[in-house]
Image (cartoon, grey):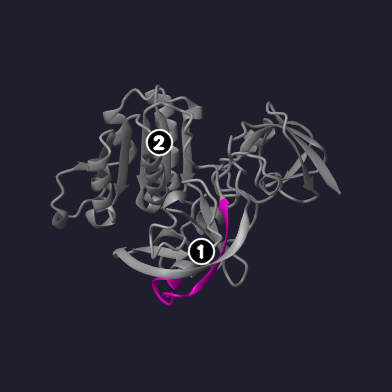
Amino acid sequence: MSFNVSVQPSGRQFQVDRDEPVLLAAIRQGVGLPYGCKDGACGSCKCRLLEGRVIHGAHQVKALSPDEEAGGWMLACRAAPQTDLVIEARTVPGLGEFPVRKLPTRVSRIERQAPDVAVLQLQLPANDPLQYKAGQYVEFILRDGSRRSYSMANAPHRQRELVNEQPHIELHIRHMPGGRFTDHVFGALKERDILRMEGPFGSFFLREDLPAPIVLLASGTGFAPIKALIEQIEHRRLAQPLHVYWGCRRRADLYQDDWLRAAAARLPQLRYVPVLSEPAAEDAWDGRTGFVHQAVMADLPDLSGHVVYACGAPVMVDSARADFVARCGLPEDAFFADAFTSEADKHGLSVGAPLPSDPPAPSAA
């Protein structure tokens, strides 16, 4: 049995199999609903249920609260229809343009750019480069079927510029001790190993039709998709002001500081502001300190004419969204985000699901 879902105001329609989450059916059929983690943790796919009935699977309360559900909201990644549905959701132009597919990838290079950050170069099939938008992510499929998500750090046009002109993607992976995948990356993974992945996923990508000044906001390895966006902006020769804020704990965590400074030297419209939350004495840091999104607010108290792309820890993304909208006049629909949710984040669920034995592993959602 399948059900029909009608999306308003776009008028798009698609079919959802019984017990299938609405979002997964939309992705499968190329319907551009906004989303991030696909795991009930980030709330990016929240939309209004106008007609019909759904059953929600396990999800975090912060993604969809009981009051929101009672008020007619649903979480598309966790909502399985019980009847035909009419939902209200903004559709994302260009999302679903590229097919989601599974493919093998070979490890070409592993480089430690910080004590707990590895930069991976992964070779794709020679005549079959991955089609994706700068800012999107892929999922690695582990042997037990579980998945880990990471954003591409290189824009699509740079797939053949990384290693020997073979198609490659670049990933930035932070080590989470005890994490099944990251322990493998920082321990046993070696060059020429084969990994299985699927993608592209995610509605975090550059909206080139918005000519407003751009704020790119990152924390930690949330810099990966921000780097891809900068490469895309340079490639497309977009000229609007570009403010890049990167927040980390200590100086060593700014693992591609030199890359960003070189980009700022090439692009006259790019202003780069690194921010450290806990600089060590040996850092001899004389730059900005504190919370990175507060540095943006201090420099740009009026964001009413800007567009913001934020990527990193959920607490940073959530704080930036709330403060930029409430205190700086940023329109709600001018904030695009990708919160890097861990496995612990994903399984801190509102509906009785126990925590898995697998400790946190970072992902893009």
Position of residue 193 measured from the top left corner of the image (x, y, whole percent):
48, 75
Q: Secondary structure at mark 2?
A: helix
Is 333 positioned to the left or the right of 108 in the image? right
Tell me which corner region of the image, top left, top right, bottom left or bottom right, holds residue 197: bottom right
- What residue is pinned by disc 2? 320
Q: Residue at x 28, y 45 (%)?
A: 263
Q: Nearer the viewer, residue 304 or 239?
A: 239
Residue drawn at the location 39% of the way across and 71% of the way down: 186
Residue type indicated by callout 1 = Leu
Q: Amino acid at mark 2?
A: Ala
Left or right relative to 311: residue 40: right
Q: Is residue 198 magenta?
A: yes
- Answer whether residue 23 is visible to the viewer in this image: yes
First in residue order: circle 2 vs circle 1: 1
* Other residues around mark 1 within 10 Å, as few (<14) / some (14–19) / many (≥20): many
Q: Could you say where residue 42 lies in the image, as x and y percent from the top left? A: 54, 45
Residue 163 locus on image (x, y percent) = 38, 64
The magenta segment: 183-200
Where in the figure is residue 346, as x and y percent of width and height?
Answer: 55, 54
* Mark pair 2, 1: CA separation: 35 Å
Q: Residue furthest right?
A: 1
